[in-house]
Every structure is written in C-alpha cells, then in structure tokens.
Amino acid sequence: MIHFPAQRRGPLSALSLRVAAALGLVLATVAVVWFDRDGYRDATGDGLTLLDCFYYVVVSLSTTGYGDITPVSPAARLVNVLYITPARVVFLIILVGTTLEVLTEQYRTGRRLSRWRRTVKDHVIICGYGTKGRSAVSALLENGMDKSRIIVVERSGPALRQATSAGLVAIEGSATRSATLNEAHIRTAKAVIIATDSDDASVLVALTVRQLTAGQVRIIAAAREAENAPLLKQSGAHHVIVSSATAGRLLGLSTSAPPLIDVVEDLLTPGQGMALAMRSAERDEVGRSPRELDTLVIALVRRGKVVTLADKAGAVIETGDMLVHVRDDRPQAASVV
C-alpha cells in the first residue's frame, strides 16, 4: 500500500466545521421564516411562534415535510423557492458530507497515484525509516534533493506516519519482497539505501534489489557488525557503512584526540562551517597538482576509485577526475544595501 503525505484536516476539526455549518444554516433559515412569519399558516390557523419557525425549518430542511405549516402569501412562497429549497440541498450535502469526502478523497488519491507512477524516476528508495533512515533522508534533503524523489519502504505503522508527516511518499510492506520494491519502481531508481534494524534483513534486501535490477541501481547499506560487511558486499551492496565500528572509532578519537571529534561533526553537519563536497575537474585544472588549487582538495575519484593525494597517481589531475574537497558551508550573511 502506498501512503502519500496527508493533505487534509483532522477528523475532529472537519466534523466541528460541518456541525457549525449545519447549525448556521438552520439559524439563518429560522431568521428568514421568522421575519416573514405572517405569510405562513399552521393547521390550526394560528400564527407562527419562534418554536414553530424552528419546527418548520428543521422539518423542511430534512425533507420530512409534514405539511402542517405552509406558506400562503406570495412573498413566503417566493422565499421557499429562492431560499428554502437551495438551503435544503445544502443541508443535505452537509449531512452526507462524510460520504462525499470519502469519495472525493479516493478520487484524489487515485489521481495522485496515477500521476506519481508516471513521473517517478531517478529517485532514492530508503528501506527502513528508523534512526538511520531518518538521518539519511535529512542528509539528502540538506544536499538539495526534492522530497518527491525520496520513497520510504517501511512495515511499521508509526514509522509510516512519521514519513508521511514529513512530506514523503511511503510504501507499506517489507523491502525483502519483490512486489514491494516494484511498487517503489526499483528499476528506475537512482539508488537504494538499506537502513533496516538487522543485518540479516539488510542482506535479504540487497539480494532482492540486485535480482530485480541486475546491479544497475546503486545500493548503499548500513551494517551493525563489521563481520557482516563482506556478506553485504557479496549480496550486491556497492557501499557498506558499519555503524558500530564507526561509532567505536569516534568514541576512541574523543578520548585520544578530542578536537578531531569537533572537526568530524563540523564536516558532517551542514551549515556549521566546513562540509565535504565533490565536483568534476575543470578543463584548466587538468594536468595540475591538486595541491595547487585554491580549493582544498583531499582526494580524487578516478574511474570509480578513490585516489589519495599521497599516492603517485594523485599527484596530477586527469580528465574525468572528480575532486573531493572541503568547502565553506556557513550561511552567507545577507548583504546590507
């Protein structure tokens, strides 16, 4: 099942608005009848009291129509034609508003689903919306990816609600099932991020993705234990991040070299100061040393492999190289006119 971001008010708010509209319509109609009460007669021939006006309005708007109170003057009959009858239709619409709202919502959801199926392409699929999954989504959004290009696959109801509340499209189901991944249009995806709670589930997801895409979609997986990283790579993952090992190294650095932790956090936190970035080498940079550039280059990516500046191959920039550099990520101060 595909869940789209919610776009309507809560049920209590919708119900309160509907009840208030019904009461407002009744009171307005009572005021019209009371103002022209001399043009009405009841079965006993007496004039209308305020209670009679309420009775007539409720009976008329609900289409019960006992006929014991009738308009006799031309003005009263004109009011019934021009006001009471349209008000009766509006009142019925309010009464059956819940059914109309459900039908309208189903129609709107169907149209959104059809439009989404036609346009979804080059998207990123997040398998698991726990702590790692939410952090991955935050990083994608901070790097400029549109929410419409992120799809969450999750089985947990609370996690699904969190994803849709964040404005993301979420698919309910297990990412280990081919049918669920096909609903996420796995074959036209740009990448799959596996952020499940267990390594065995991550292996199954990686195998399923590789089977469906024949290795054409990049797979990035998180592993709890380092010993499972080779298994994930054998299952089809292009990159594996070992969460426990990474956390352990950071803990060790915080003891032996505390300032390094601040540097790492600065690099990983956007908008704080420094940030890691990657760009293509420009034509006038080819043949030069990365150390000569104004940009602080820390590594090269050549034909899909990382080349450090300490290697001889990293001494000169070649055509097609990607430059991994540190950029200033602090918010630019607004210019003063």
Image (tube, grey):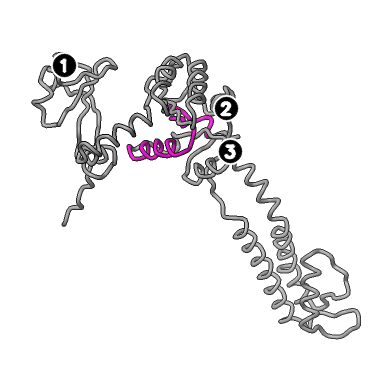
Mark 2 → mark 1, Cα distance in angstroms: 44 Å
The residue closer to the viewer here, 324 or 221, is: 221
Asked if residue 227 lies left or right of residue 26, the reply is left
Name which residue lies at 58% across and 41% down.
Answer: 157
Name which residue lies at 68% across and 69% down.
Answer: 25
Question: Callout 1: helix, strand or loop?
Answer: loop
Residue tagged by mark 2? 180
Amino acid type assigned to the residue bearing label 2 in the image: Thr
Task: Assess whether mark 1 and mark 2 are in contact (beta carbons under 8 angstroms).
Answer: no
Residue tagged by mark 1? 311
Name which residue lies at 65% across and 60% down.
Answer: 15
Question: Callout 2: helix, strand or loop?
Answer: helix
Amino acid type assigned to the residue bearing label 1 in the image: Asp
Local packing at callout 1 (Cα closer than 10 Å; few below 14, some 14-19, many 20+) is: few
| Residue range highlighted in magenta | 116-143
The residue closer to the viewer here, 234 or 154, is: 234
Task: Assess whether mark 3 and mark 2 are in contact (beta carbons under 8 angstroms).
Answer: no
Task: Assess whether mark 3 and mark 1 are in contact (beta carbons under 8 angstroms).
Answer: no
Observer-side mark, 2 or 3, equals: 2
Residue 129 forms part of the magenta stretch: yes
Residue tagged by mark 3? 111
Q: Position of residue 178 (x, y in %)?
A: 57, 22
